[in-house]
Image (cartoon, rainbow, N blue to C red):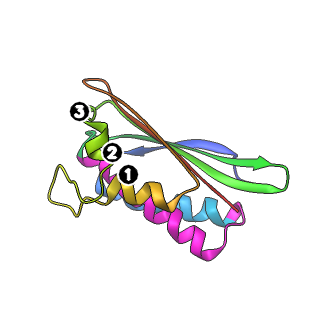
Amino acid sequence: MSPESGEAAVRTEQDVVLARQLVRRLAVQAGLRLVDQTKLVTAVSELARNTVIYGGGGVMNWSLQQEGMRKGVQLRFVDQGPGIPDMALALTDGWTSGSGMGLGLTGAKRLVDRFEIRSELGKGTEVTISKWN
């Protein structure tokens, strides 16, 4: 039996790939349907990449959750980067601080059941997401 929680480094592009692979296994273990596995892995890809590119690297804390008969995966991405100066703007569809399509945070938010973000200038950003079966 695998652990119910853990932490993975998210500092390089290779770590993004490893985070995706880990979350795919967790989603299967939690009993998520294939479409929900894909949604969760896509959200993880966006958030892990943001952690590396904008946050200067950080960690992904993960845990398997259970509420009654429902099972799920909870993930928390934490970095000590510069923080997000304008949260409303960062959560606007189409806005990007880089060369991407501007769908990272808003896209991730739409793909999961729970999305919470906290950011403090000069201290970093924390994003918590959950997906349930």
Residue type at mark 3 is Pro
Q: Which residue is mark 3?
A: 85
Of the pair 127 and 107, the residue shown nearer to us: 107
Question: Cα distance, mark 3 to mark 1?
Answer: 19 Å
- Pinpoint residue 99: horizontal percent, then vertical percent: 14, 59
Q: Rounded to the nearest whole Å, what is the CA distance between mark 2 and mark 3?
A: 15 Å
Residue 101 location, quadrant: bottom left
* Residue 98 appears in the rendering: yes
**For residue 39: magenta?**
yes
Alpha-carbon distance for marks 2 and 1?
5 Å
Residue at disc 2, secondary structure: helix
> Magenta span has 89?
no
Q: Nearer the viewer, residue 50 or 115?
A: 115
Q: How many marks?
A: 3
Q: Position of residue 12 (x, y in %)?
A: 30, 51
In which quarter of the view is residue 102 placed?
Answer: bottom left
Residue 44 visible in image: no
Residue type, label 2: Thr
Q: Are marks 2 and 1 in contact (CB under 8 Å)?
A: yes
Q: Residue at x 49, y 64 (%)?
A: 41
Q: Residues within 10 Å of mark 3 (few under 14, many from 20)?
A: few
Would residue 93 appear left or right of 37 to someone viewing this image?
Answer: left
Residue pointed to by mark 1: 48
Marker disc for residue 51: 2
The residue carrying pointer 2 sits among few (fewer than 14), some (14 to 19) or many (20 or more) residues within 10 Å by Cα, namely many
Q: Residues within 10 Å of mark 1 (few under 14, many from 20)?
A: many
Q: Tell me what residue is drawn at x 33 percent, y 45 percent.
A: 51
Q: Secondary structure at mark 3?
A: loop
Q: What are the residue bounds of the magenta stretch?
A: 29-53
